[in-house]
Image (spheres, rainbow, N blue to C red):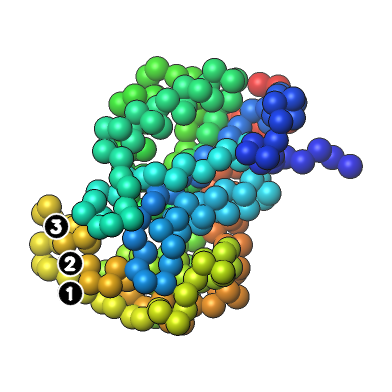
Amino acid sequence: MSEPMFLDAGRATLPEIERFIERVPFAILPVGSTEQHGPHLPTNTDTLIAERMALEIGKKSCGLILPAVPLGYAWVWRDVPATLTLRFDTYMRMIRDVAESLDRWGIKAVYVVSGHGSNPQPIKHALRELIHDQLDIKMLYGMYGGLKEMLAEADSKPWHDDIHAEEIETALMLAIAPELVHMDRAAADYPPVPPDYGKSELSMGNFMRSGVFGDPTPATAEKGERWISLAADRSAALWQGFLARHGLIPGEDK
C-alpha cells in the first residue's frame, strides 16, 4: 500500500512530520477569521470552513495540513462585538513569518486556502512585497475553489455577488458542524447597496443589519457536502497544476 500524500500536522508528532516532508515537501495552510456571522452561525465559521477545505484538498492532492489561523483581516466588522481583526500590515507580516518558518523546514511550496474573503488581499501583498524576492518557497493563495458554480447552483439570489452567512456558508457549516448552526434563527437579509460601495471607503459593516447578507434558509447539509467536494476538486487541481508548473513532483527529490 502506498504511503498517504497528506498529513494533519496538528495531530502528528515531530518524527511523523519529519518523515512526511522528506517525501512530500509541500504544505497547505488554512486561514480563517473570527467575526460575526449573523444570528445563526458561529464566529469561527470561516475558520472551520477553511480547515475542512484544506483537509479535503490534501486528500485529493498532497501536502502537510497545517493548523488553521483563526484570526483574519476583518476590518469591515471591526466595530462589531465578537470580531477580532489583524491590521493589514500585521497580517502581511504574519504570512511572511509563516512562510519563513516553512522555508526553514525545507518546505518548497505552500497553498494558503482562505475561508474569509478579505484575507487574500494582504496575502497577495505579502507575497509580492515580503516573500517573493527573499525566500525560495513557492506560494499559491486564494479562496477555496468552485464559488462561481456554488452561486449558480444556489436556490437563493446572492447579495451583490458576495457571500456572508447566506445559503452557501450556511450549507457548508451544516455539513461541517451542524451542532453549531441555529436554523431556527436563520432569516434572509438583503441590505441596500449604496452606489459607491466598492468605490469608496464604504464596507459591508457600514450597512449590516442582522449580519446576514443573502438568504440562508434554503441551505442543507446535502448541498454543503456537495459543495465541499466541488471546492476540493477545483482547488486540488489548481494546486497540482501549480506544483507541476514549478517542476515540483510529489514524492520525487527535486
Q: Dot 1: what SS?
A: loop
In the rendered structure, find residue 207 and report the number of the disc placed on it. 2
- The answer to whether mark 2 and mark 3 are in CB contact below 8 A is yes
Q: What's under tag 2, amino acid-wise? A: Phe
Q: Which residue is mark 1?
A: 192
Side of 15 relative to 62 (left or right) = right
> Which one is in front, 30 or 77?
77
Side of 11 relative to 197 (left or right) = right
**Residue 116 place in picture, x, y as percent:** 39, 53
**Residue 36 place in picture, x, y as percent:** 34, 60
| Residue at the image point whose x is 57% and y is 64% from the top | 177
Q: What's under tag 1, amino acid-wise? A: Pro
In this rendering, does residue 230 appear at all? no
Whole-angstrom CA distance, mark 2 to mark 3, is 9 Å
* Mark 1 or 2: the one toward you: 2
Using the image, determine if residue 83 lies above or below residue 88: below
Disc 2 packing (10 Å; few <14; some 14–19; many ≥20): few
In this rendering, does residue 197 appear at all? yes
Whole-angstrom CA distance, mark 1 to mark 2, is 8 Å
Using the image, determine if residue 123 lies above or below residue 237: above
Task: Tell me which label, 2 or 3, sits earlier in the chain.
Answer: 3
In the rendered structure, find residue 202 and report the number of the disc placed on it. 3
Q: What's under tag 3, amino acid-wise? A: Leu
Task: Tell me which label, 1 or 2, sits earlier in the chain.
Answer: 1
Whole-angstrom CA distance, mark 1 to mark 3, is 12 Å
Q: Quadrant of the C terminus?
A: top right
| Residue at the image point whose x is 32% and y is 65% from the top | 162
Task: Tell me which label, 1 or 3, sits earlier in the chain.
Answer: 1
